[in-house]
Image: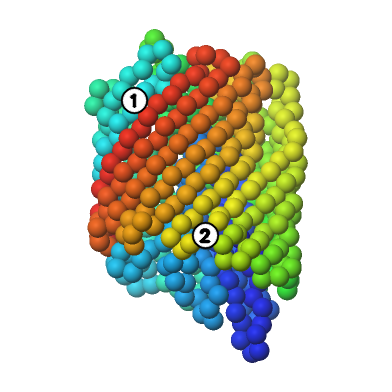
């Protein structure tokens, strides 16, 4: 991404606001999102909404974020649609209208559709297919203040399976983010999310033998202070996350209690970035976490850890932009059977745009977390993704992606590899409606045969918005 510094040209400032992707991880670290900065003027883009996910959710690490990265080489803050990422850009005539009430804008929408799943229980011995109806109403609220900013979003997602009603579930969430402008060069960034969610059958952290989703309640928040010192930009913040898991059911009808995964995660994080030029910056990020989880009488799940990354933030011409960081990570578990997981850490995010109609994305990341006590206690996951988004027409976007994930378990002898392919088509009928098609294939190969499975998911949906 392009470093956030405005350079003077005569008496005027020219700059580039850039949206930095916040990664939803087990420790839920909220790194600072930096936009155009300078001695006389600063603009900070709000951090994106963090998607709902348990501490680790296989092949969902790289899900797209709702906010576009904005590149602006003009003298004002107007960004042309063709200068935003293909997948998130809003073309004139297709953007939602919204309803204004004083200093607030309201954007309601509802999505309905159906999903076919070829292996709803993620089994390698007894594959059952099913069709689920999906209903997803949503409401986004955005502020129109001259200073500061706030965004709230409420969502409800319900899945109703035709032949396996035990798989039915409903997720409900409220999340938000805000920016308080203390001064032209200092901001307070805040975010929160909470609600009731379900962990789908087949996830790496799902209990072994589960044939129903695992419900859990999640509450989290982050407060980050960001300050500019000419070319040096720094931030420091704290995060808190609380999990309360319910019980699920095994194939033989027994109850699988997941209270052992209840607990809190505390995180402290900081970041320093030095802007060398408008197209190049150097950064160092550090985070520490304390995971206070209940565990069981025979198996503790609590741990503490640190992760440090140092790297570059760049934009090479108008075609290539990205961020690359390498460093060290260490997570020490209280349980002697798990011990300490440590070693090199990395994160890479690269976007290549050979034309304004095509984005090619590469992502790589490593994460350490804990899984269900019925399957494993510690997991180090490495994931790579290559994806492309092509604007076939102004109102039609094709997306393809391939993700490869390697999971190494600590506390038992198990290694998994996960491959996932995704193909999506989004067709905007007008500013009030759209149609979407999606196919995903998932294949998990495990050293423990009971965890090996593959499945196809095919979905169609219609969205109405205002």
Measured from the top left, where is residue 5 in percent x and y? 66, 72
Specify the quadrant of the image occupied by residue 383: top right
Name which residue lies at 64% across and 51% down.
Answer: 238
Vertical placement of residue 303 versus 345, above or below: above
Is label 1 or label 2 in front?
2
Measured from the top left, where is residue 335 in percent x and y? 70, 22
Measured from the top left, where is residue 121 in percent x and y? 39, 21
Q: Residue furthest front?
A: 354
Q: Residue furthest top?
A: 252
Image quarter (top left, top right, bottom left or bottom right) of the N terminus: bottom right
Q: State the residue position of label 2.
A: 354
Image quarter (top left, top right, bottom left or bottom right) of the C terminus: bottom left
Q: Is residue 385 left or right of residue 301?
A: left
Name which residue lies at 29% across and 57% down.
Answer: 428
Vertical placement of residue 112 versus 88, above or below: above
Q: Nearer the viewer, residue 258 or 402?
A: 402
Are the residues flagged by discs 1 and 2 in contact, CB closer than 8 Å?
Answer: no
Real-space CA distance between mark 1 and mark 2, rounded to the nearest whole angstrom = 37 Å
Q: Tag 1's secondary structure?
A: loop
Q: Tag 2's secondary structure?
A: strand
Name which residue lies at 64% across and 39% down.
Answer: 366
Q: Which mark is residue 423?
A: none
Q: Which mark is residue 118?
A: 1
Name which residue lies at 62% across and 42% down.
Answer: 365
């Amino acid at each position: 991404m392009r470093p956030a510094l405005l350079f003077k040209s005569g008496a005027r400032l020219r700059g580039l606001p850039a949206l930095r992707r916040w990664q939803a991880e087990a420790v839920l670290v909220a790194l600072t999102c930096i936009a155009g900065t300078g001695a006389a003027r600063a603009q900070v883009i709000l951090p994106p909404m963090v998607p709902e996910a348990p501490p680790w959710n296989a092949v969902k690490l790289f899900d797209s974020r709702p906010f576009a990265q904005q590149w602006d080489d003009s003298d004002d803050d107007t960004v042309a649609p063709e200068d935003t990422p293909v997948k998130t850009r809003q073309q004139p005539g297709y953007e939602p209208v919204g309803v204004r009430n004083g200093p607030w804008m309201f954007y309601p929408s509802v999505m309905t559709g159906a999903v076919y799943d070829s292996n709803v229980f993620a089994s390698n011995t007894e594959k059952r297919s099913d069709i689920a109806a999906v209903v997803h109403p949503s409401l986004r609220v955005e502020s129109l203040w001259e200073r500061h900013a706030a965004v709230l979003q409420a969502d409800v997602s319900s899945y109703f399976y035709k032949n396996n009603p035990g798989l039915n579930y409903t997720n409900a969430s409220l999340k938000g983010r805000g920016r308080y402008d203390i001064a032209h060069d200092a901001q307070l960034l805040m975010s929160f999310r909470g609600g009731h969610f379900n962990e789908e059958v087949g996830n790496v952290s799902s209990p072994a033998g589960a044939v129903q989703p695992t419900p859990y309640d999640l509450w989290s928040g982050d407060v980050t202070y960001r300050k500019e010192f000419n070319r040096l930009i720094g931030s420091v913040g704290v995060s808190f996350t609380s999990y309360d898991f319910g019980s699920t059911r095994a194939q033989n009808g027994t109850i699988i209690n997941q209270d052992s995964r209840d607990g809190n995660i505390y995180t402290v994080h900081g970041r320093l970035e030095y802007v060398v030029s408008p197209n190049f910056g150097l950064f160092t990020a550090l985070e520490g976490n304390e995971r206070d989880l209940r565990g069981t009488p025979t198996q503790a799940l609590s741990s503490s850890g640190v992760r440090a990354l140092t790297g570059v933030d760049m934009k090479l011409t108008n075609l290539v932009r990205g961020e690359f960081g390498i460093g060290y990570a260490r997570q020490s578990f209280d349980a002697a059977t798990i011990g300490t997981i440590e070693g090199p850490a990395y994160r890479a995010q690269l976007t290549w745009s050979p034309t304004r109609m095509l984005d090619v994305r590469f992502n790589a990341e490593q994460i350490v977390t804990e899984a269900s006590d019925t399957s494993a206690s510690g997991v180090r996951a490495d994931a790579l993704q290559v994806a492309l988004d092509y604007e076939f027409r102004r109102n039609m976007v094709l997306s393809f992606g391939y993700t490869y994930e390697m999971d190494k378990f600590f506390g038992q002898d198990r290694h998994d590899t996960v491959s996932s392919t995704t193909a999506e088509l989004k067709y905007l009928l007008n500013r009030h409606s759209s149609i979407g098609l999606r196919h995903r294939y998932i294949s998990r190969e495990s050293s423990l045969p009971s965890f090996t499975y593959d499945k196809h998911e095919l979905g169609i949906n219609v969205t109405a918005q205002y």
